[in-house]
Amino acid sequence: MADLERITVAAHGGVRLSCLRAGPSGGEPVVLLHGFPESASLGWRRQLPVLAAAGLRVWAPDQRGYGESDRPPRVRDYVIDALSADALAVLDAAAREAGRPRAHLVAHDWGGAVAWWTALAVPERLASLTVLNCPPLGVLRRALLFRNPRQMARSWYIAWFQVPWLPAATLGAARAALLARGLRDSGRRASPGRGATFSRADLDAYRDAATRPGALRAMIAWYRALPFDRPLPPGSDGRVRVPARLIWGARDRALGRELAQESIATCEHGELLWVEEATHWVQHEEPQRVNAWIAEWVRAWGPA
C-alpha cells in the first residue's frame, strides 16, 4: 500500500503506541484493535488495504505489549482501564485529524474486550462499534464464574496463564511453538474451496513476533491483569448505547456462540451477524464479507 504509514501515538501513562495508518486523510476515521496473539500488521492485514481503498481513514495500533509498541513491566499496567485509555488516545487522535467529533471502533478478540469497555465508559466518544468474536468482560465473567461449565472448560488457558512463571517459561523454551500450534488448531483447516486460516509463513510470523524480547510476558500480562479488573466502568449500568454490530464466527472453539447472544442483548441498538463456516479468526477466513460489513456499519453511522 503506497499510503500505508507508521506513526506513534502517546497513550496512557506515557506508553507509546505504534500505529499503522492508511486511507484518505479526510475519510471517516476508523480505529482497528487487534487481539491475542496478533498485532496491527498481522491481525488486520486483510482489512487495512481494503478499508483504506474504500475511502476510510484507518488507524491500527499495536496495542501495549505488542509489535512495535511499548511493553510496560508490571501486570497492573495491563488492566482494562489502561488498555481502554490507550484505545481512547488513538480514537481521539483519529477524530482530530479527520475533523470529526468521534471515531469508529472495530475490534477482534482481546481488542473486542477493550472496545466494549470503551463503549461503556465513554459512549459519547465513539461514532459506532464493530466487534468480532468477543463478548464484553462482564458477559464472559458471568459465564466463567457462575453458570456456564462448557465455557469454563473452553477457557482453561486463562487459568493456566495465571501461573506466575509456567506459561512464559514453557512458551519461551519452545520458541512459541505451542502458540503457533494453538493458532493452527483453533483456525480452519484447508478444505475444498477454502484454504487453511494460517499458512506456514503466517505461523512463522506469529512465532517470530512472540519470541521478541519481552513479548510473551507482555501478551500474557493481559490475562494476568484480569483479577484486578472491575466488573464495569464507573457509572456504567452495563448497557451499550453506542450503535454496535457483532460479527461472530460460529465455529469458535474458545468462545461459545451463546456468548454472542448474551453480548448483543446488552446493546440498545445492536445487530448480530453470524458467519456459520468461520472460526474465531473470522476476519482472516471471510475477509470480503467482514470488510463489507465493517464499511457498511461505519457509513451507516458516519456524518449525514
Image: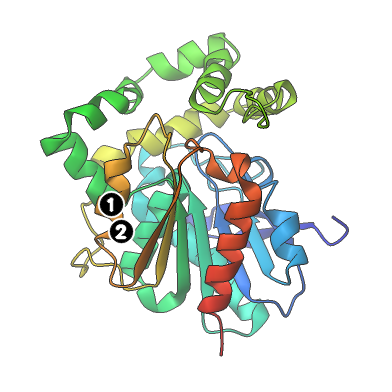
Q: In front: 213, or 130?
A: 130
Q: Tell me the tag on residue 264.
A: 2
Report whether 153 appears left or right of 255: left
Up-down relation of residue 169 to residue 263 (above or below): above
Report whether 260 appears left or right of 94: left
Up-down relation of residue 81 to residue 218 (above or below): below
Quickly name the residue at label 1: 261
Q: Tell me the tag on residue 51.
A: none
Q: Mark 2 is on which residue type?
A: Ile
How has the structure been colored for display? rainbow
| Pointer 2 with pointer 1, Cβ within 8 A | yes
- Spot occupied by residue 104 in the image (x, y as percentages of width and height): 53, 70
Which of the image's four quarters has the N terminus? bottom right
The number of callouts visible is 2
Question: Is residue 17 in view from this perspective?
Answer: no
Q: Residues within 10 Å of mark 1 (few under 14, many from 20)?
A: some
User: Looking at the image, which residue is at 35% across and 42% down?
Assistant: 76
> Extreme left residue here?
146
> Extreme front residue here?
192
The quadrant where residue 50 appears: bottom right
User: Looking at the image, which residue is at 44% across and 76% down?
Assistant: 125
Q: Mark 1 is on which residue type?
A: Gln
Question: Is residue 168 in view from this perspective?
Answer: yes
- Spot occupied by residue 63 in the image (x, y as percentages of width and height): 54, 48
- Spot occupied by residue 219 in the image (x, y as percentages of width and height): 49, 34
